[in-house]
């Protein structure tokens, strides 16, 4: 067994892999700054020792065999510099996953701009409930497992399901992470421009996806969203079998007669024009129907019987922070948290909530935090994606000092455009009042009986969720 030190252990994937390797018998430690729930609690619950802050003393105390370098770590970090000076082996997290967890298992990789976490979680659950004991790596905490990563129960001859992120790997390896996961079965949910800090254009992103498709062996299978022209174009160059999933009957796998109630969505599963089964899954919105189709298609490719898939579906639990219902409070006010931080993800999430909570006002709190939404790249798209929301709270732009004013998201302009649509808009953090306490005070004046409050951020939103939970109780 080896000893691994995770430099940047607070990242969702990094923490999950650290726990998986600890469970496999390896010695695991690490360090990070600004650890917040749920990953800090996750590490604590699994007895993973970690240091808060970076110091060469941390590495001197632990003397690891290898340092796993998170992709947020760059030159100048004191622990990284110490590791380089003392010739400690450096590994990226994806490289570690490929060798220690994927190994000789059949590798199933879920890729795409949106829907990766939900699709990966659902697929892993289908295989688990079907008795296949899959290993998996999910960019979140899937509720059916309560862990984000584990080794396959049939090491070397089982299945490993990976959420394949297109973001870069490490400071010394600028390939997209999914290029290291050796796919045998792959899913591409959709392809859009994102991650403006590392990609220059959609064409730049498409280049990475082409390389990903080119890694699938001839004996493998690629499942692609047939409703996404960009994804279909990328898939056209594959050397393996390709099958489409979509809401159109032109796709091999399709969904018909979609109906949603307060607990789940139901649809007819059709393959090559033939009805196969009625599927009921506790997910909402057409985008989640596509995620479900992708998971079903990939699960059948593993040999899992359709009746086993159908039986497992109703018992699937959404990952944390994916339309997660935090609670329902006085005056029937419902608080929901979601990871959406791209205009398309915001739009489809709010549309799904509008379908689920018919007749109730939707109040959306959005934090511009990603490297894409803090810039003005999606200035126009952000003004068009809040359709179902009656009230929009715009959180502070995260680390605005990174960009010149003319390149940053203009929240004042966004406010004007949303108000022209008849929405009530609040720009948080604009005065001396505490942030995000000012959001709580604003909402106290706005909330009505039956309102649905949804928090959209890929970060902690300054602890807004906990403040609202206290305020609404």
Image (tube, helix red, strand yellow):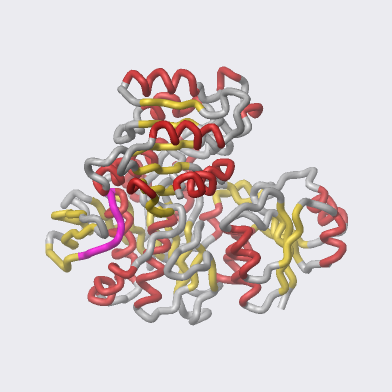
Q: Position of residue 395 (x, y in %)?
A: 52, 33
Q: Is residue 148 magenta?
A: no
Q: Is residue 282 magenta?
A: yes
Q: Position of residue 452 (x, y in %)?
A: 35, 43
Name above or below for residue 123 compared with residue 338: below
Q: Nearer the viewer, residue 173 or 263?
A: 263
Name above or below for residue 427 compared with residue 181: above
Describe residue 266's horizontal placement relative to residue 417 as left or right: left
Q: Position of residue 165 (x, y in %)?
A: 50, 52
Q: Nearer the viewer, residue 439 or 406?
A: 439
Residue 99 in view (yes/no): yes
Q: Residue at x 63, y 32 (%)?
A: 399
For the record, the magenta segment spans 279-286
Q: Nearer the viewer, residue 118 or 467?
A: 467
The tally of labels here is: 0
Name above or below for residue 445 compared with residue 10: above
Q: Residue at x 54, y 74 (%)?
A: 151
**Could you say which quadrant of the image residue 282 lies in?**
bottom left
**Could you say which quadrant of the image residue 15 lies in?**
bottom right
Q: Position of residue 62 (x, y in %)?
A: 82, 67
Residue 228 in view (yes/no): no
Q: Residue at x 17, y 66 (%)?
A: 278
- Image quadrant holding the N terminus, namely bottom right
Q: Residue at x 61, y 28 (%)?
A: 400
């Amino acid at each position: 067994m080896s000893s691994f030190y995770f430099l940047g252990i607070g990242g969702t994937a990094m923490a999950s892999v650290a726990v998986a390797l600890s469970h496999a018998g390896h010695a695991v430690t690490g360090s990070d700054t600004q650890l917040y729930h749920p990953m800090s609690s996750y590490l604590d619950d699994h007895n993973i020792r970690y240091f808060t802050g970076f110091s060469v003393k941390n590495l001197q105390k632990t003397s690891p065999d290898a340092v796993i370098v998170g992709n947020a770590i760059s030159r100048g970090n004191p622990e990284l510099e110490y590791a380089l000076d003392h010739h400690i082996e450096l590994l990226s997290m994806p490289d570690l996953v490929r060798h220690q967890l994927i190994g000789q298992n059949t590798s199933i990789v879920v890729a795409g701009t949106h829907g990766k976490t939900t699709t990966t979680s659902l697929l892993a659950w289908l295989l688990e409930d079907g008795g296949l004991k899959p290993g998996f790596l999910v960019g979140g905490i899937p509720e059916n497992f309560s862990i984000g990563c584990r080794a396959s129960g049939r090491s070397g001859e089982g299945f490993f399901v990976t959420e394949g992120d297109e973001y870069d790997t490490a400071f010394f390896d600028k390939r997209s992470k999914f290029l290291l996961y050796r796919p045998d079965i792959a899913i591409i949910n959709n392809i859009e421009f994102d991650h403006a800090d590392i990609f220059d254009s959609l064409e730049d992103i498409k280049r990475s996806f082409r390389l990903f498709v080119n890694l699938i062996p001839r004996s493998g299978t690629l499942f692609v969203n047939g409703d996404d022209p960009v994804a279909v174009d990328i898939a056209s160059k594959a050397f393996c079998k390709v099958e489409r999933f979509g809401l159109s009957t032109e796709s091999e796998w399709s969904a018909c007669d979609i109906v949603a109630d307060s607990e789940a969505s139901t649809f007819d599963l059709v393959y090559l024009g033939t009805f196969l089964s009625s599927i009921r899954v506790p997910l909402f919105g057409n985008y989640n129907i596509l995620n479900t189709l992708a998971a079903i298609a990939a699960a059948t490719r593993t040999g899992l019987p359709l009746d086993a898939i159908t039986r497992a579906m109703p018992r699937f639990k959404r990952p944390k922070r994916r339309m997660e219902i935090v609670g329902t409070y006085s005056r029937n006010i419902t608080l929901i948290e979601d990871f959406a931080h791209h205009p398309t993800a915001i739009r489809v999430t709010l549309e799904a909530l509008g379908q689920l909570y018919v007749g109730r006002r939707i109040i959306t709190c959005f934090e511009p935090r990603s490297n894409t939404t803090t810039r003005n790249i999606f200035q126009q798209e952000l003004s068009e994606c809040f359709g179902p929301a009656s009230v929009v709270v715009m959180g502070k732009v995260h680390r605005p000092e990174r960009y010149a004013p003319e390149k940053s998201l203009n929240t004042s302009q966004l406010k004007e455009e949303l108000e022209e649509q008849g929405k009530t808009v609040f720009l948080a953090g604009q005065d001396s009042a505490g942030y995000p306490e000012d959001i709580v005070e604003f909402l106290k004046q706005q909330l009505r009986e039956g309102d649905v409050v949804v928090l959209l951020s890929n970060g902690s939103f300054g602890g807004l969720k906990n403040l609202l939970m206290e305020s609404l109780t």
